[in-house]
Amino acid sequence: MFRSFKRLSLLLLMMLPVLAATAAAPGKSAIASAHPLATAAGHEILEQGGNAFDAAVAVSAALTVVEPFSSGLGGGGLWLLSRAEDQHSVMIDGREVAPGAATADMYLDEQGEPIPRASLDGPLAAGIPGLPAALVHMADQYGRLPLAQSLAPAIRLATAGFPLYARMRLGLQYKQKLIQRWPAGAGIFLVGGDVPEPGHVIRQPDLARTFERLAVEGRDGFYAGEFADGMVSAVREAGGIWSAEDLRDYRVVERAPIEFSYRGVRIVSAPPPSSGGVALADMFNILGGFDLAGLDKVTRIHLNVEAMRRAYRDRAEYLGDSDFVAVPVGMLTHPFYADGQRSSIRLDRATPSSALPGYRGEEPKGAHTTHYSILDADGNRVAATQTINGWFGSGYVIPGTGVLLNNEMDDFAIKPGVQNLYELVGASANAIAPGKRPLSSMSPTIAESDRGVIILGTPGGSRIISMVMLGLLSWIDGADATAVVSLPRYHHQYVPDRIYFEPAALDEATRKELESMGHELRESSRLYGNMNVVTWDYAGDEVRAASDPRNEGGAAVRVY
């Protein structure tokens, strides 16, 4: 059955409209990222003659310095690239992998129950980082400039330092006790063991030297030789299970993106080990069978939620690293499959998640990642989402390196049906195995229609996919970049069976109607997401960049 679905899927993809392939180059460059200094680093490289892919190296590296609670050399990411000259799209998979000594039950006690925080705190929670290898790969295979040139802004930022800002200080307060456990991290981020005041300059000379080594030696500057051996020794001494072979054998993978269409819009997003593209295709295929424009607001929200519910259910059941397990991508992204999903949706009533096949019920728990979007003057595009998973990852900085390690091992299903940091459940498809990449919700996405192009994505753990979905729907309905990032958000992820929402997303009357349909609602106690969007409207060659008003991001459009 999967083979026939795959053949049909390929035929449908061949029939996708060729949209705006002959559009002229925009003549302007735009970057939207989570921090103004990272956006400035990318524009600096574009001004020096680099393309969008060189700028992506610069932005990724700068975010490592100025947003260390979200991503870094000790983590990984997914980079969706679209090259203007030949319309080539590819996803650079720099996701972390499980160490060779990892086992399926490594975070369970003798009774088979999860050991509290074992998959979250300290180096045992860390997968083998992929971000350094991804930066080298992008520079070598897609950039115009030497790697050292694109890394120069990050090296300068790490050396000179930057002032502590409100969101980072909030993260330090949240994770202060964890960071205090290891001297290297405490020495960078704390003063006398305490969280410094706003404006305190954060300097990272060890991280600057690590970047310099990567700039000179390339991949081997991180994954081989004395530097790699020193990292392994330190990690093992602190309770981790890395080996020199784990670092030596790490490889970036180029993957074909997930592509689908919705009402004349071609959407390109991340394939496994991300669940984002598959889930988005499923949700949009479900919604494509309804006349959303002819329905009232409450019914549209209800249908969006029901599409989310079913896509997140399939995420829990089927999705994992396709290099290790058979993921039925063709089936899950096929319109025929969505027809079956849609047939179980009532317009007047919520479907209890417990009524869906394979229900896995657990109660909740926690978010940190970062996203940026780039368009260069030639029309090259990058949507990139990178992460160390939770706030400040594992909390462990490898001494002498400035490298803060991820806690990405928590993204595996450490036990079927048990929720992770983001309340997500998983099955055996996402079980821990040596060399395997954990399932992700990262959803860097590029969409194109006769109107133009949108490049978007966001952090937010399990909520990433629903935020990208709502952002795309608003753009398709005519919203500009600023409206997309400002859109009030709501979210459903199958388990727990409730709609989370920002206060402005659902007015009181809407809440009451949704509750009368059987939906459980919970107002979000904090604003979530940090979307960064670039748009290019073909009419008038209008290029815009916008950062989420919920945070301090930086967005800028320039002409060189």
Image (cartoon, rainbow, N blue to C red):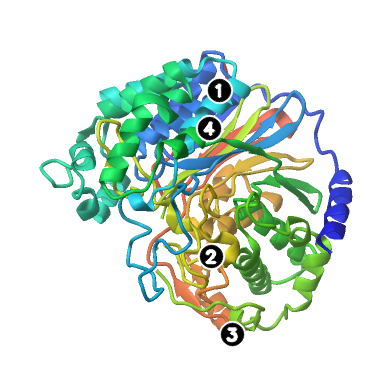
Q: Earlier in the sequence, mark 1 or mark 4?
A: 4
Find the distance from the CA under tag 1 to the CA under tag 4.
Answer: 9 Å
Of labels 2 and 4, earlier in sequence is 4
Between marks 3 and 4 in the image, the one whose residue lies nearer the viewer:
4
Point out residue 5 in the picture as x, y percentages from the top left corner: 84, 59
Q: Residue at x 43, y 50 (%)?
A: 101
Report whether residue 480 is seen. Answer: yes
Element type where label 1 sits in the image: helix
Callout 1 amino acid: Ala
- Quarter of the image where one finds residue 315: bottom right
Whether residues under marks 2 and 1 lie with C-beta atoms below 8 angstroms apart, the answer is no
Q: Which is closer to the viewer, label 2 or label 4?
A: 4
Residue 398 lies, in percent from the top left, at 29, 38
Residue 134 marker: 4
Q: CA distance from mark 2 to mark 1?
A: 37 Å
Q: Amino acid at mark 3?
A: Gly
Q: Quadrant of the C terminus?
A: top right
User: Looking at this view, is 209 or 173 the one in front?
Assistant: 209
Q: Quadrant location of residue 138? A: top right
Among numbered discs 2 and 1, the one appearing first in the sequence: 1
- Residue on which the image places disc 2: 490
Q: Are marks 1 and 4 in contact (CB under 8 Å)?
A: no
Relative to 134, 36 lies left or right: left
The extreme left residue here reads: 192
Q: Which mark is residue 518?
A: 3
CA gap, disc 3 and disc 1: 51 Å
